[in-house]
């Protein structure tokens, strides 16, 4: 008994439709969880303490989605494989197809076609979409933090900057009261204190600086002959400094908003694959950029790797419960992605060859998947 080509095409459409549907549902579920967690981590303080427009939050969520898709898309595809082929194996559908002369390799043809399409999507996300989205995320965080600094209503605000601490007693729409600035030297010793009753904030777009204008300024400076073993921060080691009607302090906006975000403006994730290639040509931090370059490519092959490993494992276990499918997908995805975490840990250690460690997951799972698939096809 054999199955006609029309029936085989029908089987292809059924498997492809099931895989696409389950992949979409699993990826959407995982992406929502990871995106919300990422958004909360990045803008927690701004959302809780300031009125952030809903449109800005939605834009930030959309920009965070590509980063999560790097992991959730292969993860969702693997979960879909366990669900679809686990159910087909449990219901003896694969056995019936095999008895009808349809080889397991032919049954899995739509699986590998979908895996190739998803891997191409992952490559585009890793190479261009995610870096561009992360750049936009940084701009959003930057603008939100500046807006909060200029327009917020706050009391007893402390801003820690490099070699300087700024205290603002009260702020209302950029107008300041009881402004105190503490300047520290390279040895973290208090060098100067500046106090002003009133002031206001101004932003310089040309130089990307925040200017603090202060009125009726009084300052105290540390005595130059203060001994290191003396209490350098005591009143005895300070003398009256300048007094002025108006003094302005220029502060880098990056330093001013850095405490609001956990993302570095010059992080590797913000560079496209082409930009990473250009950085490699310069030779600066060669190991770091080379490992990131290999990570982007290696991660893009996750869907193909999962297709080769997931199908035989799903058939051998033949479990059709949804919770089992999600659990197996979680366990295998974590065991795969842990190799990338290990390689990231040694990113700055050229002796460990982190660029090769980025391929360790594929190097182990691809041969394993090939062996399991061969065993399955010869049964």
Image (spheres, grey):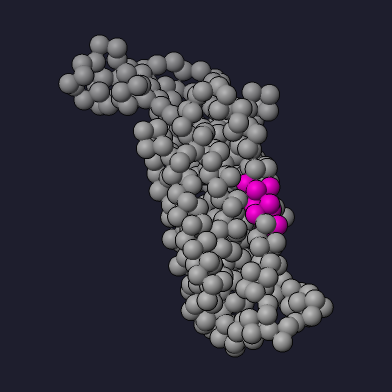
* The furthest residue to the front: 1
**Position of residue 292 in the picture relative to residue 223 (left or right):** right
- Identified at 51% across, 34% down, the residue is 290
Q: Main secondary structure of the magenta part?
A: helix
Is residue 78 placed above or below 173 in the rendered structure?
Answer: below
The image shows residue 213, relative to residue 20, as above or below, that is: above
* Res 199 visible: no
Residue 246: image location, x then y, percent: 56, 21
Is residue 193 toward the left or the right of residue 236 in the image?
A: right
Residue farthest to the right?
A: 6
Q: Could you tell me which residue is drawn at 59 percent across and 88 percent down?
A: 91
Residues in magenta, as a range: 117-126
Q: In the image, residue 230 lies at what x, y percent?
A: 18, 21
Determine the residue located farthest toward the top in the rendered image.
225
Q: Quadrant of the N terminus?
A: bottom right
Above or below: residue 4 compared with residue 30:
below
- Residue at image point 17% right, 21% down: 229
Q: Is residue 90 magenta?
A: no
**Magenta-span inclusion, residue 118:** yes
User: At which x and y percent is residue 145?
Assistant: 59, 42
**Figure quadrant of residue 322:** bottom right
Name the residue: 52% across, 76% down: 379
The image quarter in which residue 279 lies: top right
Q: Quadrant of residue 105?
A: bottom right
């Amino acid at each position: 008994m054999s199955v006609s080509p029309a029936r085989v095409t029908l089987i292809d459409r059924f498997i492809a439709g099931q895989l696409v549907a389950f992949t979409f549902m699993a990826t959407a579920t995982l992406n929502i969880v990871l995106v919300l967690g990422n958004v909360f981590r990045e803008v927690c303080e701004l959302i809780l303490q300031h009125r952030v427009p809903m449109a800005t939050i939605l834009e930030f969520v959309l920009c965070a989605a590509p980063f999560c898709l790097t992991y959730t898309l292969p993860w969702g595809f693997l979960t879909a494989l366990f669900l679809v082929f686990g159910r087909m194996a449990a219901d003896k559908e694969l056995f019936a197809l095999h008895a009808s002369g349809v080889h397991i390799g032919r049954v899995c043809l739509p699986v590998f076609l979908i895996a190739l399409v998803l891997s191409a999507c992952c490559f585009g996300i890793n190479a261009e979409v995610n870096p561009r989205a992360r750049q936009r995320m940084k701009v959003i965080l930057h603008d939100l933090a500046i807006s909060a600094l200029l327009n917020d209503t706050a009391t007893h605000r402390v801003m820690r900057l490099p070699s300087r601490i700024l205290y603002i007693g009260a702020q209302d729409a950029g107008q300041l009261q009881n402004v105190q600035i503490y300047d520290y030297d390279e040895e973290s010793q208090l060098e100067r204190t500046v106090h002003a009753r009133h002031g206001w904030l101004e932003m310089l777009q040309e130089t990307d600086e925040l200017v603090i204008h202060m009125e009726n300024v009084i300052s105290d400076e540390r005595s130059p002959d203060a001994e290191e073993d003396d209490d350098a921060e005591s009143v005895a080691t300070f003398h009256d400094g300048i007094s002025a009607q108006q003094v302005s302090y220029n502060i880098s906006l990056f330093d001013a908003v850095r405490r609001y975000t956990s993302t570095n403006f010059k992080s590797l994730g913000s560079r496209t694959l082409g930009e990473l290639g250009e950085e490699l040509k310069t030779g600066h931090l060669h190991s770091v950029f080379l490992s990131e370059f290999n990570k982007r490519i290696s991660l893009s092959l996750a869907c193909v790797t999962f297709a080769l490993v997931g199908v035989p494992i799903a058939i051998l276990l033949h479990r059709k419960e949804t919770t089992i499918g999600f659990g197996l997908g979680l366990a295998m995805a974590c065991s795969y992605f842990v190799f990338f975490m290990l390689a990231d840990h040694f990113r700055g250690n050229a002796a460990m060859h982190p660029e090769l460690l980025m391929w360790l997951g594929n190097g182990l799972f691809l041969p394993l998947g090939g062996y399991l698939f061969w065993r399955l096809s010869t049964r």
